[in-house]
Image (cartoon, rainbow, N blue to C red):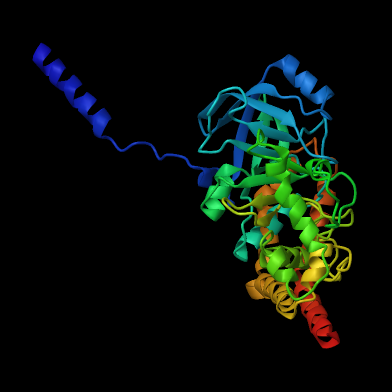
């Protein structure tokens, strides 16, 4: 009898070790565009009250992060954003290693839980980043989630991939260069701000290498804008290309132009909503897009809006090949979104995906009816924008 019991136990133990493991979850699963995830945060009730009361501050609080049974304990959460900050529907940044050194969640050091406060359709940024990726450009991955804090539904949120070392490794294959988040201080159009490194320090917040000297962090940025502002002569481009990838800048500006972006590289408040990255071992910089809630302004939005205000763009456009690259990228965006009605179809698909979560979201600052109206406005944009843009390109080429 004992032998049979021992044998059965041995067989069960062997089966436990040989059974196929449960499917491991990855960051790709978290950013699955076809799924509305469920994310839960657990925060001390006193800390949650303070977080809501002091949502204008960047104070961190301890929280557990739970998704599909996987928990990151003692993560740091804080309020984030500018106009999107809210004590009612918190906009949040989650840093998994804030209090636990080296902690990662699915390989991620941090992520953004975006409250979708400024966009009635709740999909401007998701669609914009999808187009960047569709056109082969580096862009943050995004998905949606129903967010619960202490088991209370907070509404529909976007899960946004942070621009950090993980993002750099995924998109560029290297992550040891110098990364900066642009901070809107006052209107800046790429002018030479002089010798004072402090003028650049207040605008470009380091995301790594924070302890290095200001001369190392900001010296190449100062030189970048000094060279950009020099007279456009026979060697201007050769000098400038040592400090900035002009083709990449023009490409990003072109995609934003198609998207009728009001607050990007050529924004109404000057340059805004981007990350600047200096490639490892070089002085050469490139840009990454960020925060596209202000896209899709109007179908008839001119692709040359504020074209003369930005120094980098204005001087780059004096070179025929870069000017033509701009038009080619805008044209590619127009044709790509119109092909098989991709953009309109994507709008409908995403709207269907999030509809029930939107209706249940009592913290959103607009009605469900306003959401449905915003979706229809987006569909009109998708139908009209490609043709209007192609007409603008043809007219601009004729003028030149």
**In this view of the protein, which residue sits in the foreground, 29 or 248?**
248
| Image quadrant occupied by the N terminus | top left
| Image quadrant occupied by the C terminus | bottom right
User: In the drawing, does residue 319 fall left or right of residue 210?
Assistant: right
**In this view of the protein, which residue sits in the foreground, 131 or 373?**
131
Q: Is residue 376 visible?
A: no
Q: How far from the left and from the top, in percent, is residue 37?
A: 60, 41
**In this view of the protein, which residue sits in the foreground, 336 or 104?**
104
Q: How far from the left and from the top, in percent, is residue 186?
A: 90, 47
* Residue 234: quarter of image: bottom right
Q: Is residue 276 above or below residue 67?
A: below
Q: How far from the left and from the top, in percent, is residue 237?
A: 72, 70
Q: Is residue 259 visible?
A: yes
Q: How far from the left and from the top, in percent, is residue 272?
A: 81, 52
Q: Is residue 146 above or below residue 305?
A: above
How many numbered callouts?
0
User: In the drawing, does residue 37 fall left or right of residue 3?
Assistant: right
* Residue 213: quarter of image: top right
The residue shown at (80%, 54%) is 372
* Residue 342: quarter of image: bottom right
Extreme-top residue of the structure: 2
Extreme-bottom residue of the structure: 398
**In this view of the protein, which residue sits in the foreground, 313 or 228?**
228
């Amino acid at each position: 009898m004992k032998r049979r019991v021992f044998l059965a136990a041995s067989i069960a133990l062997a089966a436990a070790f040989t059974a196929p493991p449960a499917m491991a979850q990855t960051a790709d699963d978290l950013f699955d565009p076809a799924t509305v995830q469920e994310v839960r945060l657990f925060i001390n009730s006193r800390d949650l009250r303070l977080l809501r009361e002091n949502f204008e501050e960047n104070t961190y609080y301890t929280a557990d992060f739970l998704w599909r049974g996987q928990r990151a304990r003692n993560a740091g959460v804080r309020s984030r954003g500018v106009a999107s900050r809210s004590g009612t529907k918190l906009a949040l940044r989650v840093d998994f290693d804030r209090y636990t050194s080296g902690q990662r969640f699915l390989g991620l050091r941090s992520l953004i839980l975006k409250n979708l406060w400024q966009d009635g359709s709740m999909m401007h940024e998701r669609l914009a980043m999808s187009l960047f990726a569709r056109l082969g450009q580096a862009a943050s991955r995004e998905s949606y989630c129903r967010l619960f804090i202490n088991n209370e539904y907070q509404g529909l949120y976007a899960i946004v991939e942070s621009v950090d070392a993980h993002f750099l490794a995924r998109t560029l294959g290297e992550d040891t260069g110098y990364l900066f988040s642009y901070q809107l201080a006052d209107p800046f159009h790429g002018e030479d701000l002089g010798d004072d490194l402090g003028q650049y320090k207040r605008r470009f917040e380091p995301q790594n290498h924070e302890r290095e000297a200001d001369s190392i962090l900001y010296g190449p940025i100062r030189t970048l804008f000094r060279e950009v502002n020099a007279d456009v002569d026979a060697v201007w481009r050769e000098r400038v290309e040592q400090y900035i990838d002009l083709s990449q800048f023009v490409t990003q500006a072109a995609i934003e132009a198609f998207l009728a972006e009001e607050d990007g590289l050529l924004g109404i408040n000057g340059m805004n909503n981007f990350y600047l990255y200096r490639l490892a071992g070089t002085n050469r910089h490139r840009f990454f897009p960020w925060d596209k809630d202000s896209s899709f302004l109007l179908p008839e939005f001119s692709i040359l809006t504020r074209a003369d205000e930005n120094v980098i763009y204005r001087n780059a456009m004096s070179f025929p090949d870069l000017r033509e690259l701009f038009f080619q990228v805008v044209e590619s965006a127009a044709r790509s979104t119109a092909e098989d009605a991709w953009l309109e179809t994507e709008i409908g698909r995403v709207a269907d995906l999030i509809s029930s979560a939107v209706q249940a979201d009592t913290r959103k600052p607009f009605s469900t009816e306003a959401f449905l109206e915003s979706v229809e406005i987006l569909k009109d944009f998708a139908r009209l924008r490609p043709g209007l843009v192609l007409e603008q390109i043809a007219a601009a080429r004729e003028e030149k």
